[in-house]
Image: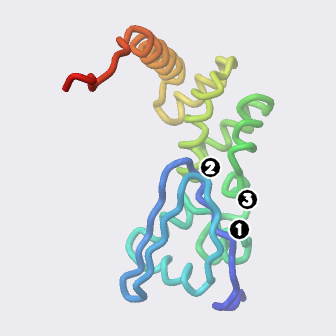
Amino acid sequence: MIKDSAIINVRNMTNQTVVYKIEEENIRKKFAGYETKKIAADELRKLYYIPGGQELLREYLCVENEELAKEFGVPADQVEYYWTQADVDNVLLNGSLEELEDALEFGPLGIIDVIQDRAVALKINDLTKRDAIFRFTGANINNMIINSEEDTETKSAEQANMPRGRRVSRNS
């Protein structure tokens, strides 16, 4: 049993901001994307029992202590719970299709979000992996990559065509 005073590393699995509040204790924690904080086990247990706390601890915040994670209901065989962005990149670029499908089917929601984001950012070439992501999430990686490229081209064109000039003249 982990003592309440034990300090545990807790990592935001996603590149999105995650915030929680424990009103009774006047505690508010804000995690930037992929940020790790050291938090007392007691505070994590209190978070677990507030509305939405279980989902945060199982799906978006990685409690980097296997015993405490198990206490919060994280399955022992859910290896994706401990993945980092580098692990996701490795699966997308070098891993097997089966490994990716397992992650999409059994991984926490935060990691599934990262898989989608990184597949677009990395512009993965493997069409079977793009298809697997679509089958499990409904996210069309092909279209998302095309849209991100169009957005980049549009922004570049807008910046190139933007007239440069002073906003204030000496005479005014």
Give SS at disc 3.
loop
Name the residue carrying label 1. Answer: 64
Give SS at disc 1.
loop
Dots 1, 2 in contact, CB < 8 A = no
Could you tell me how far apart the alpha carbons at marks 1 and 2 are, in whole angstroms? 18 Å
Dots 1, 3 in contact, CB < 8 A = no
Of the residues tagged 1 and 2, which is closer to the observer? Answer: 1
Dot 1 or dot 3: first in sequence order is: 1
Which amino acid type is shown beneath numbered disc 2?
Phe
| Tag shown at residue 138 | none
In the shown orientation, is residue 170 left or right of residue 7?
A: left
Which amino acid type is shown beneath numbered disc 3?
Asp
Give SS at disc 2.
helix
Q: Horizontal and vertical percent for residue 10? A: 64, 68
Q: Horizontal and vertical percent for residue 149? A: 51, 16
Of the residues tagged 1 and 3, which is closer to the observer? Answer: 1
Could you tell me how far apart the alpha carbons at marks 1 and 3 are, in whole angstroms? 15 Å
- Residue 41 sits above or below residue 136 on the image: below
**Which color scheme does this rendered protein use?**
rainbow
| Tag shown at residue 77 | 3
Dot 1 or dot 2: first in sequence order is: 1
Dots 2, 3 in contact, CB < 8 A = yes
Name the residue carrying label 2. Answer: 106
Q: Horizontal and vertical percent for residue 115? A: 61, 38
Q: Residues within 10 Å of mark 1 (few under 14, many from 20)?
A: some
User: Where, quadrant-wise, is the C terminus in this rendering?
Assistant: top left
